[in-house]
């Protein structure tokens, strides 16, 4: 979901992130990315926890990153896009995820 959605009509759990400067990834330029955090399930959270336990890297930051990667996949995006965006953009998306989870 990368199309623009008016903030007043955004469904609960949806976040449209606008990049300060367009992001180039895999030959495509993104001015914004849409995340529908409401599609994430308890199973997603359990799967992420299991992955991190198996890796021995159960830190809150890594858990949040992996949930963001899952939200990317749910939106039909390659999850690697989160790994190449600027830290400020990633942190803003992470804050919005935290707001949703609270």
Image: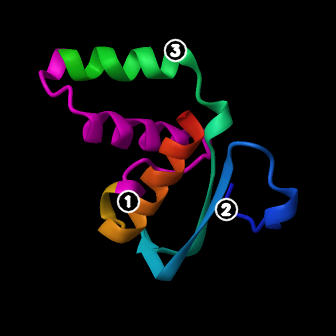
Residue under numbered circle 2: 2
Task: Give yes or no for contact between labels 1 and 2 (Cβ–Cβ under 8 Å).
Answer: no
Number of numbered discs visible in the structure rendering: 3
**Residue 44 pos. (x, y %):** 49, 22
The disc placed on residue 13 is none
Residue 97 within the segment the image draws in magenta: no
Q: Is residue 79 visible?
A: yes
Q: Horizontally, is 97 left or right of 56 in the view? A: right
Indicate the secondary structure of the residue bearing disc 1: helix
Residue under numbered circle 1: 91
Q: Give the main secondary structure of the magenta stretch.
A: helix
Residue under numbered circle 3: 43
Q: CA distance from mark 1 to mark 3?
A: 24 Å
Determine the residue positioned at 42% across, 14% down.
Answer: 46
Q: Which residues are magenta?
A: 54-82
Mark 2: few, some, or many residues within 10 Å (few <14, many ≥20)?
A: some
Q: Point out the tag, 1 or 3, that comes first from the N-terminus.
A: 3
Point out the image quarter for the N terminus: bottom right
Determine the residue positioned at 32% across, 33% down.
Answer: 63
Q: CA distance from mark 1 to mark 2?
A: 19 Å
- Using the rendered view, name the quadrant where residue 37 is placed: top right
Indicate the secondary structure of the residue bearing disc 2: loop
């Amino acid at each position: 979901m990368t199309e623009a959605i008016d903030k007043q009509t955004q469904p609960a759990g949806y976040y449209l992130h606008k990049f300060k400067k367009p992001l180039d990834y895999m030959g495509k330029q993104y001015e914004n990315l849409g995340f529908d955090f409401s599609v994430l399930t308890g199973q997603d959270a359990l799967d992420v926890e299991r992955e991190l336990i198996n890796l021995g890297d159960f830190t809150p930051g890594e858990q949040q990153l992996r949930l963001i990667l899952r939200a990317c996949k749910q939106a039909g995006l390659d999850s690697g896009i989160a790994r190449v965006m600027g830290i400020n953009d990633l942190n803003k998306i992470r804050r919005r995820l935290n707001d949703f989870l609270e």
